[in-house]
Amino acid sequence: MGVVVRDARRLSPAAQEDLRRRAVAAVKAGHTQAAVATVFGVSPKTVWRWINAFDRQGNRALKAGKRGRRPGEQKALDPRQQARVRRAVLHKNPDQVALPGLVWTRPQVRRLIRDWFGIDLSLVTVGKYLRSWGLSPQKPIRRAYEQNPEAVARWLDVKYPAIEAQARKEKAIILWLDQTGLRSDAAVGATWAPVGQTPVVAKTGRRFGVNVMAAISNKGELYFTCYHGSFTGPMFLAWLDRLVRQLGRKIHLIVDGRPVHRRVTVRDWLAERVDRVEMHFLPGYAPELNPVELLNADVKHHVAQANPATPAELSAAAASHLRRRQNQPETVKALFRKPEVRYAAG
């Protein structure tokens, strides 16, 4: 078979073509693929690939071509398989294709590929496929199936502009309010989606938590309280009364439709103070319209970094981060530049 080739990759394209032809000829002459691989300085798998290509396409398969891999060429998944997986990631949740969970992670995509095609890929390879398809891991917007698109459109086009105009006329402040729970075992997830497009779309040991109620304005103002136990009407009114006294000007308060906000006692209290505070309800099942949801996510992320070991540490971490944000009005204002709440930026 001739002289041993030390590294075929260093040869020119023409020399590599000649090497491929001689290697195929050697195998066809009766030499083993392993022996040919040793002599020509390539792997047995490479020799097998040359033989397979020659058997399918003849000498044309051995010709020198432009170096580098064309999109979709010599990959574990062929273009049709890639397109099918990409469609699933873009248009379905994992639970719609018999997989657990609601967000796409690399292990989920790897499992899908294994289930559909019997191909087991590494997580690194799965990540390369996802990026080659123009996808990136992103935090999804959670959107309820029960959401009424017409109510959302009416809020964006009619109701909120009217609130904004009234507040401007009264020199009042608009505050968005929300409550959230922080848990010691909380986790944050992400899903793969097209780059630049926010996707739409749920521990063991002793667990503990603390609740936070916060209100923010598009001017960067932030007011909050941390509490344990259930959210009740008396607690809500006591905090709201302190807020009204502290601000000394009329408040237009935007809230969700949770039962406490709709209690008769709350309505009666507001009716007696209509010149100082008015409450407006967001459309049902539309939390993405409330910028405080973004603050909640920010708090949860930073509190998790603190790894609180006790309820007191959890409360302290939450209060500390919120006080920091109170001193960073530009950061609070930046929340209103997110696409889903940009309507409220003022």
Image (cartoon, helix red, strand yellow):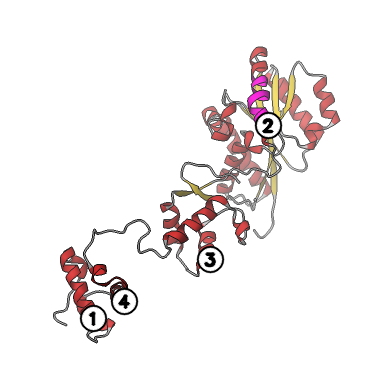
Q: Residue furthest bottom?
A: 30
Residue type, numbered disc 4: Trp
Q: Which residue is mark 1?
A: 36
Badge 1 crowding class, 10 Å Cα cut-off, few under 14, some 14 to 19, many 20 or more, is many
Q: CA distance from mark 3 to mark 1?
A: 36 Å
Q: Quadrant of the N terminus?
A: bottom left
Q: CA distance from mark 1 to mark 2?
A: 74 Å
Secondary structure under the numbered disc 4 in the rendered image? helix
Q: CA distance from mark 2 to mark 4?
A: 66 Å
Q: Which residue is mark 3?
A: 116
| In the image, residue 91 above or below residue 224 | below
Q: Is residue 190 visible?
A: no
Q: Earlier in the sequence, mark 2 or mark 4?
A: 4
Q: Earlier in the sequence, mark 3 or mark 1?
A: 1
Check residue 177 in the rendering and tell me which mark sits there, or answer none. 2
Q: Which residues are magenta?
A: 152-164
Q: Which residue is mark 4?
A: 48
Of the two numbered discs 2 and 3 in the rendering, the one whose residue sits closer to the viewer: 3
Position of residue 153 measured from the top left corner of the image (x, y, whole percent): 65, 30
Q: Earlier in the sequence, mark 4 or mark 3?
A: 4
Q: CA distance from mark 4 to mark 3?
A: 26 Å
Which of 345/152 is in front?
152
Which of 132/239 is in front?
132
- Look at the image and say whether residue 179 sits in the magenta stretch: no
Residue type, numbered disc 1: Val
| In the image, residue 193 above or below residue 342 | below
Position of residue 230 measured from the top left corner of the image (x, y, whole percent): 78, 42
Q: Residue at x 28, y 73 (%)?
A: 54
Badge 3 crowding class, 10 Å Cα cut-off, few under 14, some 14 to 19, many 20 or more, is few
